[in-house]
Amino acid sequence: MSRIDDLIAELCPEGVEHRGLGDFGEFVRGNGLQKSDLRDSGFGAIHYGQVHTIYGVWASETRSFVTEELARKLRKARTGDLVIATTSEDDAAVAKAVAWVGEGEVAVSGDAYIYRHSLEPKYVAYFFQSEQFQSQKTRHITGTKVRRISGDSLAKIRIPAPPLAVQREIVTVLDTFTKLEAELEAELEAELEARRRQYKYYRDALLTFGERTDADASKQASKHKTNDDG
């Protein structure tokens, strides 16, 4: 943290200003992409549902694609843009965001916004996970069963905006923690899987008994009768 503190002291000695996200860019709604349109190859695409389920803070490759023909009709995120899922049944998941840091453009579905901005992409994506962002967005969420937030509302949310050098240093630190968390999760999952196999082995071993035949039963009964006669 001392490196970040030093940069803040040097580059913004009067403190870090907070401004609305709309001051740094614009929110463009995705369009026309349905889940049924997704393919295993073609033009890269991000469906808003995938932002909730398979993407983390940032992505350099897409998991799904669309045909080149469909891609020509769709709005696209450029390198550095955020893709924001704007609907959910859960308030906590509304406005979950992934920074697109891959090469070229990717098609984006409706129920998602593209945030095209001048900030450090990962910095903004990490901010979207912060308590500071969550507490601000709550007052802008609307809807009953399906909860949503508009681009105009997102533009009003204030973000701390230190110089880019500070933003990048913060990203370096947070990326380190994210990588460590992923490694720990993988280790824990491997350990859990080993425990599952161990449990299955002992469960089956403890609950498996050799099946006794009628001949075995007769032999055992005869043995008991002989012992009783003795």
Image: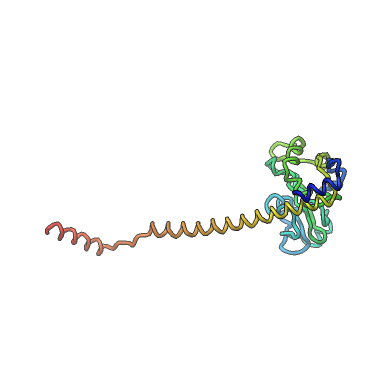
Asked whether residue 127 is in view, the answer is yes
Question: In x, y percent, where is residue 98?
Answer: 75, 51
The quadrant in which residue 144 appears is top right
The quadrant in which residue 160 appears is top right
Q: Nearer the viewer, residue 181 or 125?
A: 181
Q: Nearer the viewer, residue 98 or 88?
A: 98
Whether residue 100 sits left or right of residue 221 in the image: it is right
Q: Nearer the viewer, residue 157 or 123?
A: 123
Question: In x, y percent, where is residue 190?
Answer: 56, 59
Whether residue 189 sits left or right of residue 88 in the image: it is left
Question: In x, y percent, where is residue 95?
Answer: 75, 44
Asked whether residue 74 is in view, the answer is no
Q: Quadrant of the C terminus?
A: bottom left
The quadrant in which residue 154 appears is top right
For this orientation, the residue located farthest to the left is 230
Question: Which residue appears at 44% of the width and 60% of the height?
Answer: 201
Question: In x, y percent, where is residue 126?
Answer: 75, 48
Question: Which residue appears at 62% of the width and 55% of the height?
Answer: 184
